[in-house]
Image (cartoon, helix red, strand yellow):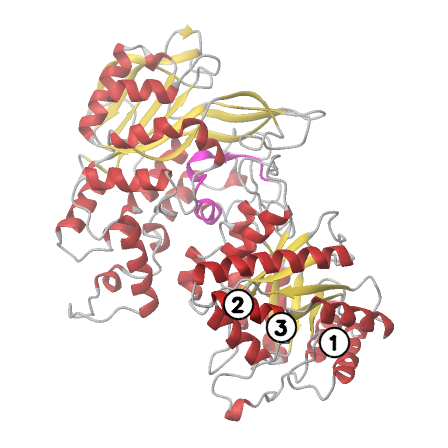
Amino acid sequence: MYLNKHFGLPSKKYIDIVTQTLKVKIELTSISLPTLPLALPHPIIFTFHIPHSTTGSTADKTVEICVNALKFHGLDVMMHLTCTNITQESLFEALNTCKKHGIRNILALRGDPPANAKDGEWKAIEGGFKYAVDLVRFIKKEFGDYFCVAVAGYPEGHLECTSLEDDLKYLVQKVEAGAELIVTQLFYDNEEFKKFVLKCRELGIPESVHILPGIMPIQSYAGFTKMTGFCKTKVPPHIMEELELIKDDDAKVKDYGVKLAVQMSQDLLDFGVKGLHFYTLNLETAVLRIVEQMGLYDDWISQRSLPWRPTLNKENNRSADELVRPIFWANRPTSYIKRTAAWDEFPNGRFGNRSSPAYGEVEQNFMSYSKAPEAQSGVPLADGARAGAGPGGEKKPLDPAAEKLMADRRAMWGQQCTSTKDVNGIFIKFLKNDIKRLPWCPESPAKETNFIHKQLIKLNQLGAWTINSQPRVNGALSTDPYVGWGPTNGYVYQKAYIEFFCSPELIDVLVKRMKEEKLDKHWAFCAYKFKGSEGENPNGASTGSGPGEKQIAGAGASSGNLSELGSSGKFGTFSPAVRTSAKDGCITNTDPKAITAITWGVFPGSEILQPTVCDNVSFKAWKAEAFSLWNEWACLYEADSESRNFVEGVRDSYYLVNIVDNDLLGGDLFTNLVSLLV
């Protein structure tokens, strides 16, 4: 959402969430970036700020995080820019980067002094800026109205102000320089905020410049007293009295903080504010509870424009009109966006003609990315660093932030992992929301998983470790809160789909039983190993029938014109056999060139949309990444330990399987799959 005059405020209240972190690289993968937009379907602004280091500006890191939040997580951002340690040249460069990537909201602040400042004194650097108003003037002079510029307001006066009246005069100057939005410092007395707003209007700040109240939920008694003491924030007596009674019970303090924030927020909305600005400090759970209790978003109706979250960056972005994606990256959209960054065009109706040079060398782009370090694991550390090994093999201490991340993951995925039973249990815990993530699933299971929850648990008990799935849907309303997407008054459809890891022994059982029960007549089945008989070949392509392949009697469903491969039947045209390639460890009954639509929608005044597909080329690329993500688990354990050897053994010997059930009317993929494996 771009604020104010470019698009206007949304008709519903919007939420502005501030979060801070020092551990930029690691926290980006674990804090609320992926989860906030899913939990809050209304437009929100992600306001990111990095506390100042002892030397240099943090502008580059702030820009990097904000670009990633916008590009990969679908969050509109309001980026903090401060005067601290920043020159006009570096600011101009940072703003140009913002413009290039479609960031249009800036919060201009003077900022705190660097950590090493003498006596905490703030000083402008040579060639820099002294006050926030200087930042506003510079932005408006150099970029005109491209950016919506917000500034800070202080209902009780800035810590360094001589008086509240003088502080308000400075605020008026910032508005006259071009500021279009005011975000206030935290407070706990609503009456002080209301008086502040009235004084702003009396001094000529127009109603078009919205003033958002800054609300910081109380998370702990000690943190609350420290923050209010530091900011010299006025606290009404009744709040302190109520906190004194519960200050030794952290859970009760958090509950009280939520209750108080709800009361304050509702009173402020009744007063007429156009939005709420929450400070989370990386503790977003309380804010989500507040938003839920206030009913600020409609969870009873679908808010999705597509089954996957499209980019918000519509400027200078070739993927702005993208309407189709393979299903395999449903849980890892960041990886998919990186893989396709070089494409000149994106499929906007059908995934079909990818031989077009506009998409680049699809297979080459997909495959080469799987070799990149970030695709090999989700941990932003080299493998030697994970093992704690120095250049000469000597042990060295891990970075504290990395050690904490690894400790958190061991708490989720096991202090040791030495058997399939251990892995079964971890996957089941994820399905039950007892742990937050898996390497393949950074977010909790989707709502639609509720329809197949019991079958998925049973499959994981049987050793089929599920990482992606969707139930069969035949003509649900597009507004359905679980499976709906797209405009209102439409209907959505999806074929049942599942993707899982399993052992070679389980594959043998599955292929045999699938043929016996004649389920291969309408199941499109594809399985890959990380290593084929000729060694590791993550980028290898299936060679089709030839030396090293064997034919397994049966027939599989596939899409496309496959009349040359077999006879037609109830569900279309099928290939004559399940084919096995020893070279790349592939077992499939699908045509290598086929592309199957597995999600589609019908909407008034529109052609049928097919936003999610399944195809073999994409799956080969995804399987290399998926198997490499086992490294994220294996690296938690010492080299040559039993746990590490076991997890790496799974990576090297197991299959990754996907199955599409083409029987939309009568198919029961998940129940039938359980029956085959029991």
The answer to whether one can see residue 129 in this image is yes
What is the secondary structure assignment of the residue under circle 1? helix
Label 2, label 1: how many angstroms apart (C-alpha)? 43 Å
User: Earlier along the polypeptide chain: callout 2 or callout 1?
Assistant: 1
Left or right? Give the position of 27 relative to 418.
Answer: right
Query: Which residue does the numbered mark 2 point to in the structure image?
Result: 243
Q: Residues within 10 Å of mark 3 (few under 14, many from 20)?
A: few
Q: Is residue 51 above or below residue 492?
A: below
Front residue (pair 55, 572): 55
Query: Which residue does the numbered mark 3 point to in the structure image?
Result: 237
563 is within the stretch colored magenta: no
The amino acid at mark 3 is Pro
x then y, percent, for residue 349: 59, 31
Q: Is residue 407 above or below residue 487?
A: below
Label 3, label 1: how many angstroms apart (C-alpha)? 41 Å
The amino acid at mark 2 is Leu
What is the secondary structure assignment of the residue under circle 3? helix
